[in-house]
Image (cartoon, helix red, strand yellow):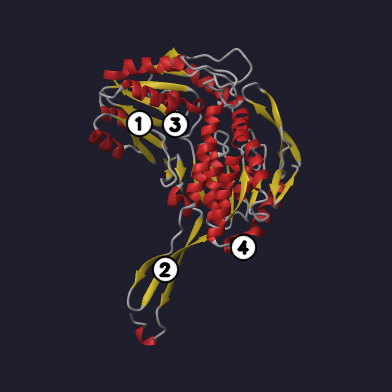
Amino acid sequence: MSEYKLLIGGALVDGASTIDVINPSTEEVLATSPRASEAQLDQAVAAAKAAFPAWAATPIAERRRLVKQIADVLEANADEFYRLLSLEVGRTIGESKEEIDYTVEFIRGLADLEIKEDVVYEDEFRIAVQERRPLGVVGTIIPWNFPILLVGFKVPSALLAGNTVVIKPAPTTPLSTLRLGELIAPLFPAGVVNIITDANDLGPKLSAHPDVAKISFTGSCETGKRVMSAAAATMKRLTLEMGGNDAAIIMPGVDVDVVADFIMYAGFTNAGQICNCIKRIYAHADIYDELVSKVAARCEAHVLGDVLDPATTYGPIHNKAQFERAKEFLEDGRTNGVIVAGGEVLNRPGYFMRPTVVRDITDGTRLVDEEQFAPIMPFIKFTDVEDALARANASPFALGGSIWTPDIDLGNALAGRMEAGMVWVNDHGSAFVTTPFVGAKQSGLGAELGVEGLLAFTQLHVVYRRKQLQYGHLEA
C-alpha cells in the first residue's frame, strides 16, 4: 500500500499523528492514514482562503477544464481505485467499479452545467440583473459508504462555482480520497483543493470555523444536526444530505420477478448501506407471499467472502460499530417478525451478515421505524393503499420513496402524495447529473446535483441600475 499524505496548500504532508484503517473483510489493519491536528485544519482553511480570490477570478472555462481533469485522473487509475475502495469500504469489486464509473460520469456532467446571469426586471428606466457569486471556502464532509462518489457530488460543483475546498473524508475510509488528492494535486493552483483526515474530532471545528463560508455534509441525521448547530454562529450556508428510511409501496398486478430483482439491487446493494436505498417494503396482500418468497430466494443465493474475488457477490458491513448496531436490528426482526432468509452473521473474521428478509412485522418496531443501514429488509403486508401511504409518510425521514404498480396513473397520483424529497414510480434510487438529489423533513436541507446543487455553492447577487441618470425620472 502507498504512503498516504494530507493535501494542504498544494503540498503533500504528514499528519500530526496517524490512525489505522481497518479492512472490514478481515478486521485487520489495511493501512495507516495520517491524522490532521486542529492546527493543520487551520492551515488547510487558510490555504483555501488565500487561494480563493485568484480561483474565483479564473475564467469559468478554465475552471471547467480543470474539474474535468479529476474525472480523467479517476478514469486513468480506475483499477487502483476499484481495489482500494473494495478493501477500505468492504464492497465487492463490481460495486466499487460502479462507484468509480458513476463518479467519472457525474464529474464530467456537473462540469458542463452553466451558471447564468438573468434579467429579473426591466422597464423603460431600470433593469435588475440576478447574478451568482462564489461563497469562499467550502468544507465538504464525506461519509464512509461512498467516499469517492460523494466527493464527486460536492467538489466539482463547488470548484466550478469558483469556491476553494477543504475535504474531510470519514476516518474509516480516508485512503481513496487521499490517493485522489495525491493524483490531482499537480492540476490545481496551491490551496484550491485541500484534504485533511481526522478521528471524528475535526468535523465540529470545520463546521464552526470562521473562515469557512459553507459546509456540504452527507451523513446521519444526528451528526447533521450537530453540523447545523456548529455552523449557526457564523450563519454558514449549508447543504445537509442526511439519513433516510425509504418506503416502497408495491401494488397488485406487478411482475413479481422484476420487482424482486429491483429490490435486491435498490435495497441490498452495498450491504444496504445507502442513504436512499429501499429500507421498508409495504406489499399488497395479493402479492405479499410470492414477493417475500422470491426476494428470500435471491438473498440465499448470495456468496459472501473475499471482496476481490469475482465469485463473491456480497461484502461485509463496513465497521464494527455499524455491525453491532445491525445485530440489534436483527434481533428486533427476530423478536417482532419472522426471518425467512439470512438472519445470521458468519463465524469468520470480518463484519459479515447474510442478507436478511423479515416478514410479518409492522410499524412500531425498530426495524421498520428506524434507518437500519444494514442488509435487513422488513416486509409489511397491507390491503388498503391509503393505509400504506399514511404509514410511509409517518416517518420523520423523507429522503426517497417509490410506488410499484402497472397502473401508471395510480402510480403518479400516489407519488404526488408521498412525502419525500425524491419519489420514483416503478424504479428506486436513480439519480442523474441534471436531477437534484434532495431530502425533505429530517432527511436533508438543500440539494445536490443539477443546477440547483450548483447554485447552492453560490451567493445570489442582484444588481439594480437605471439605464440613464436623469433626475426627471426619479418618480418612476
Which image quadrant is residue 19 in?
top right
Q: Spatial distance from mark 1 to mark 3, Cα to Cα? A: 14 Å
Along the horizontal axis of the image, is 324 left or right of 15? left
Q: Spatial distance from mark 1 to mark 2, Cα to Cα? A: 43 Å
What secondary structure is marked by label 2? strand
What residue is shown at x 38% (from left), y 21% (from top)? 379
**Foreground pick, 420 / 193:** 193
Asked whether disc 4 touches disc 2, contact meaning CB atoms under 8 Å apart, the reply is no
Asked whether disc 1 touches disc 3, contact meaning CB atoms under 8 Å apart, the reply is no
Label placed on residue 277: 3
Q: Quadrant of the C terminus?
A: bottom left
Q: Position of residue 62 (x, y in %)?
A: 56, 58
Q: Earlier in the sequence, mark 1 or mark 2?
A: 2
For label 2, the residue is 129
Label placed on residue 392: 1
Three-letter amino acid code at the position of disc 3: Cys
What secondary structure is marked by label 3? loop
Along the horizontal axis of the image, is 14 left or right of 238? right
Query: Callout 2: few (<14), some (14-19), or many (20+) C-alpha neighbours within 10 Å?
Result: some
What residue is shown at x 36% (from left), y 29% (from top)? 248
Q: Spatial distance from mark 3 to mark 2, Cα to Cα? A: 41 Å
Q: Earlier in the sequence, mark 1 or mark 3?
A: 3
Q: Is residue 95 above or below residue 13?
A: above
**Foreground pick, 361 / 415:** 415
Query: Callout 3: few (<14), some (14-19), or many (20+) C-alpha neighbours within 10 Å?
Result: many
Q: Is residue 331 above or below residue 281?
A: above
Q: Earlier in the sequence, mark 3 or mark 4?
A: 4
For label 4, the residue is 53
